[in-house]
Amino acid sequence: MPDPHHDLRAGIVATCREMNRIGLNQGTSGNLSHRVEGGFLVTPTSLPYERMTPEDVVLMDFEGGYQGRHRPSSEWRFHRDILRRRGEENVVLHTHSAYATTLAVHERGIPAFHYMVAVAGGTEIRCAPYACFGTQALSDYALEALEARTACLLGHHGLIVLGDTFERALWRAVEIETLAKMYVHALAIGEPPRLTEAQMAQVLEQIRRMGYGETPDLADVADTPRPRA
Ligand code: 13P
């Protein structure tokens, strides 16, 4: 019988490889999941992405049961808890990207030093307190830091990004890693001034109005230039 999840399994493999290829992650750090009916697919623990095939991806239910030839990611708890809590998101991407993690080791989030922090849905990207990898405590802290956001940093650890599709989650992760890089560079001169609440509210409204970050051919929104007939 054909596997109904084959395309999503292949999407997980392709996205993980892309994450390492573009330098957003390295080695076997990071993990990735996608929602399916009644549960989710998640990367196996500690398997190099170049060797990972769609059949290696693990199927889990929301009670923590799994099916597959490997053990699931050590971080299955936060994948499960986020997907359970955040019904509008389908993808949870976790990476140890260098600049986001540089901030996270200082237990610093990313403030409104640049308007693009709004890609995570609010006026700042929080950093969750430290907890050991693979624990329920880490999942609890992550859920709290993700409140009304689509990304958070994990203290002394890395970054979590959510998305409705693999493409959107990867796009958002690249934008946030770039922001983290710019913030680390900006800090070399001193703490940069922040945009005000009112300025950020305008940015958030502009993103909403323009459908910014949506797939361009699907956008049908205010102020969008129309193609010539
Ligand atoms: P896994 O290989 O178990 O997914 O662990 C990688 C990681 O980044 C833990 O936070």
Image (cartoon, grey):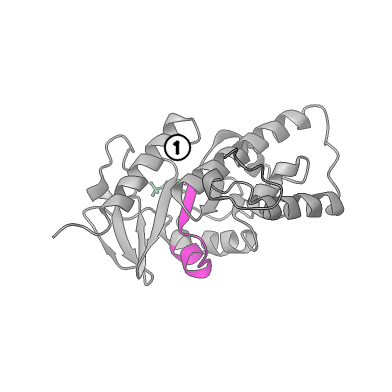
- Which segment is the magenta one? 80-94
The stretch drawn in magenta includes residue 128: no
Give x and y (percent) for residue 8: 33, 52
State the image quarter where residue 21 is shown. Answer: top left
Question: Mark 1 falls on what kind of element?
Answer: helix
Q: Which residue is mark 1?
A: 19
In the picture, the quarter occupied by the N terminus is bottom left
Q: Which residue is depicted at the point 32% across and 63% down?
A: 60
As rendered, which of 206 and 22 lies closer to the eye? 206
Residue at 53 percent across and 66 percent down: it is: 86
Q: Let me know if residue 123 appears in the view.
A: no
Q: What's the residue at 49%, 56% (across, down)?
A: 164
Magenta stretch: includes residue 83:
yes
Residue drawn at (66%, 40%) of the image? 103
For label 1, the crowd category at 10 Å Cα-Cα, with few meaning under 14, some 14 to 19 and many 20 or more, is: many
The image shows residue 222 at horizontal and vertical percentages of 70, 52
Residue 174 found in image quarter: top right
Image quadrant in which the C terminus is located: top right
Residue type (three-letter) at the residue carrying disc 1: Met
Residue that extends furthest to the front in the rendered view of this protein: 229
Q: In the shown orientation, is residue 67 left or right of residue 89?
A: left
Question: In the picture provided, is 97 more to the left or to the right than 193?
Answer: left
Q: Can see residue 85?
A: yes
Taking 88 as reference, is 159 above or below it? Answer: above
